[in-house]
Image (cartoon, rainbow, N blue to C red):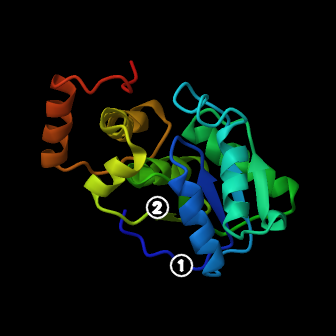
Amino acid sequence: MHHEARAVDVAIGLGSHDLGVATRTAELYRAGLFPVVVFTGGNSPTTAKVFPRGEAVHFREHAIDLDVPASAILLEPTAANTGENITRSRDVLAAAGITPATVLLVSKPYMERRSFATARKLWPEVEFVCASERMEFDDYLKSIGDEKLVVDMLVGDLQRVIEYPKRGFAIEQEVPEGVRAAYESLVRDGFTTRLVA
């Protein structure tokens, strides 16, 4: 999304297979951009072995290891998709007496646009800023250690950016023709394990 990370009321660290989300969240917390973060996410087939106690729990522990105080972290350990990440985090914040006007969404790099589109649909009164680890694509692939997984997930994410507005799950996003052509080529090449029916 090319958003510039800036001071906000709260952050939401979106659960996934990528512990870099918690790393980036901790960096931004230490930079003083927000006073509280919600880590959100249960488990998925991709994360169950890596994060057996759930994505949010492991992200919280990693952030604490990186000097984020436990008192600054709220936990939402049940969400199974991005829509639930947003709505359940909103509920956790409300239960803590927090009604933010601005929220920093921290996600995997290729998930920024979809998380933004989903959040704007489900929580339209809030201003969202997106952030993720800053690294080149090749470096990101190496950091995850499973190139096919990343490309499969990237293809699945883009499919959701295209299709979910039609289903009422997200706001519409412009997808340039070159991006659509690359997506179609990757689907033809078999990167299809993360596509939705």
Q: Position of residue 4 (x, y in %)?
A: 43, 75
Mark 1: which secondary structure?
loop
Q: Residue furthest top?
A: 197
Image position of 52 with respect to 74: above or below: above
> Residue at (49%, 50%) from the top-left corner?
115
Residue 13 versus residue 3 in the image, above or below:
above
Of callouts 2 and 1, the N-terminal one: 1
From what the image shows, is residue 166 above or below residue 1? above
List the residue tagged with mark 1: 6
- In terms of image quadrants, where is residue 139? bottom left
Q: Is residue 122 something that shows in the picture? A: yes
Residue 111 locus on image (x, y percent): 43, 49
The span from disc 2 to disc 1 (Cα, nearest Å) is 13 Å
In the depicted view, which residue is nearer to us: 155 or 91? 155
Locate the C terminus and report the quarter of the image it occupies: top left
Q: Secondary structure at mark 2?
A: loop
Q: Position of residue 16 (x, y in %)?
A: 54, 42
Q: Residue at x 63, y 47 (%)?
A: 86
